[in-house]
Image: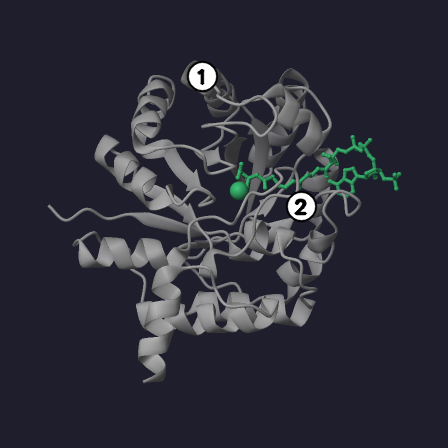
Amino acid sequence: MTDRVRIVEMGPRDGLQNEKAAVSTEDKVHLIHLLNQTGLPAIEVGSFVSPKWVPKMADSGLVFDRIEKLPGISYPMLTPNMKGLEAALAHNVQEVAVFAAASESFSQRNINCSIADSIDRFTDVCRQALDAGLKVRGYISCVLGCPYEGRIAPQAVADVADRLFRLGCYEISLGDTIGTGTPVETRALIQAVSQKVPMDQIAGHFHDTYGQALANIWASLDCGVRTFDASIGGLGGCPYAKGATGNVATEDVVYSFMQSGVETGIDMERLLDAVEYAAKMVGRDVSSRVGRALLIKRAG
Ligand code: HMG
Ligand code: MG
């Protein structure tokens, strides 16, 4: 049987939240319109977070209102608290995401509260979102290492995953925020989390800082994970993880799967249109090998 994976596009949110270049609302909307043509099933649009904490996401509501929403594609928004959820409801968002961490220090730096307090917050957010008919995704940061605490035990991640899953998150996305994880560690992580969350409700969210993301994706695939987050052109980083680079590039993941007979449903040519535009938008070459190689080839 052919394997089929689901790729969740992070570029407009995780990517652009930490790019140095000032990207206009119009450019963000245009990038999402290009991504709409690729076959991606989900495109994370932005965040309803404090503009003091993440200034680059301050126009997320405007972007969300302006984009064309195609049937069959979900357009999630990050909501760290009730204020975020209220904004999501006001903008008629259909899917939101809450984000916790497996490390106390990162939780404090990213959302200004302890892990336990964040779960309390998310209890209200999830209840009200689910009551309003929204889908809720749950992220966990620092699953394979923390910039402040170093190594994180798989069991600590599994505990947070269990709590988010019980709040009604339909999927738990495991974030290797600083990209230090390796395939053997990834397997141990997936094994621990899958004791608490069914395998088909686990997603991998690998940043590529140490060049391990694709190897970790394949290790996760071998374990049974079928959903992966990725960012067009490898855009981004994390504002609260110094030195972190972007998510694994969407085109790197699609190329690797496509050449290996794993279905993604994504059209590489249309994806390259978006890669090309993303590079112009942020004023630098894309960091992905596949993006660079295929764009050079396409230019003849
Ligand atoms: P706080 O300062 O504790 O919040 O921040 P507060 O409730 O005390 O409010 C302080 C001010 O923020 C008030 O405004 C609020 O109105 C405002 P003031 O009266 O000072 O003018 N505020 C808001 N404004 C807009 N939207 C909101 C909101 N909430 C409060 N929702 C808070 C707590 C959670 C708000 C803050 O820490 C925050 O916004 N953090 C977001 C950080 C962030 O977005 N990080 C990046 C996303 S996570 C990530 O990238 C990891 C991931 O990719 C996975 C991985 O790779 O690991 C998902
Ligand atoms: Mg991330």
258 or 202, which is in the foreground?
A: 258
The quarter of the rendered structure image containing the N terminus is top left
Q: Is residue 63 above or below residue 6?
A: below
Q: Horizontal placement of 224 versus 214: left or right?
A: left
What residue does disc 1 label?
Answer: 153
Residue 71 placement (x, y as % from top left):
44, 61
Question: Which mark, by number, is residue 89?
Answer: 2
Residue drawn at point x = 70 percent, y = 41 percent: 84
Question: Which mark, by number, is residue 191?
Answer: none
Q: Is residue 26 above or below residue 3?
A: below
Location of ligand 1 given as a quarter of the image: top right
Residue 129 placement (x, y as % from top left):
60, 36
Secondary structure beneath label 1? loop
Spatial separation of the CA atoms under disc 1 and disc 2: 36 Å
Residue farthest to the bottom, as pictured: 300
Residue drawn at point x = 53 percent, y = 65 percent: 32
The quarter of the rendered structure image containing the C terminus is bottom left
> The disc labelled 2 sits on which kind of residue?
Leu
Q: Which badge, 1 or 2, comes first in the chain's sequence?
A: 2
Residue 110 placement (x, y as % from top left):
67, 33
Q: Is residue 82 above or below residue 253?
A: above
